[in-house]
Each structure stands twice: as structure tokens, then as C-alpha cells.
Amino acid sequence: MNVLGYILSGGFANGYRTQVLGVSAALSVVAMWAVGDMSLTDLITKLPAILGGLGLAALGAKVDDAKTQAKPKGK
């Protein structure tokens, strides 16, 4: 597989795509406020998007943790 296809398909984040998506959603809103593209009131109105992104990242981490802790049943 070529390197560009690997990067664009998200292969580097295999198993962590949910966390990457959630954190990037939260950080993009905060970054827009930090550079001055939105006011503090706009940031407060976008608070559900920030918390939703962080919640998505936490959910992905919990699912990955549960997957690693699951033990196969013995014979």
C-alpha cells in the first residue's frame, strides 16, 4: 500500500480512530476561539460540541479497554 493512501485512510490510527475523531472535534472548536475566529459567547454556545467530542473520545477509550480485558472462555 502506498504511504499516502495509508495516511489518508487513517491506517496510522488503527484502533484509535474514535478517540482521534472526538479529540479533534473538541480541539477544533477551542482552537477557533483561541485564534480569534469566534467570541467567548460563541465558544459557550459550542460547548455541547466540545463535550460531545470529549465524550466520544472517552467512549472509544472505554470500548477499547473492555475489548482488551475480555478473556476468551476456556474449554
Image (cartoon, helix red, strand yellow):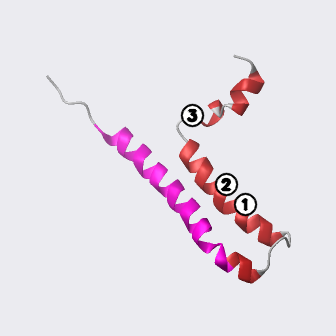
Instruction: Give the class, few, some or many, for how many residues have Cα within 10 Å of label 2's Cα (few <14, many ≥20).
Output: some
Label 3 environment density (alpha carbons within 10 Å; few <14, some 14–19, many ≥20): few
Report the amino acid beneath label 1: Ser
Q: Is residue 2 magenta?
A: no
Which quarter of the rendered picture does the C terminus lie within?
Answer: top left
Quadrant where the N terminus lies? top right
Of labels 2 and 3, earlier in sequence is 3
Which residue in the structure is indicated by mark 2? 24
User: Which residue does the image show at 57% across and 42% down from the upper left?
Assistant: 17
Inspect the image, locate mark 3, and give the three-letter code of the amino acid beneath it: Asn
Q: Report the disc number at residue 14.
A: 3
Residue 36: which quarter of the image? bottom right
Q: In x, y percent, where is residue 12?
A: 65, 33
Marks 2 and 1 in Cβ contact (< 8 Å): yes
Mark 2 to mark 1: distance in Å?
6 Å
| 57, 37: nearer the viewer | 37
**Callout 2 secondary element:** helix
Rendering coords of residue 71 (x, y %): 27, 35
Please tell me in which quadrant of the rendered image residue 70 appears: top left
> Residue 28: which disc?
1
Q: Element type at marker 1? A: helix
Residue type (three-letter) at the residue carrying disc 2: Ser
Q: In the rendered structure, which segment of residues is drawn in magenta?
A: 44-70
Q: Is residue 8 left or right of residue 75?
A: right
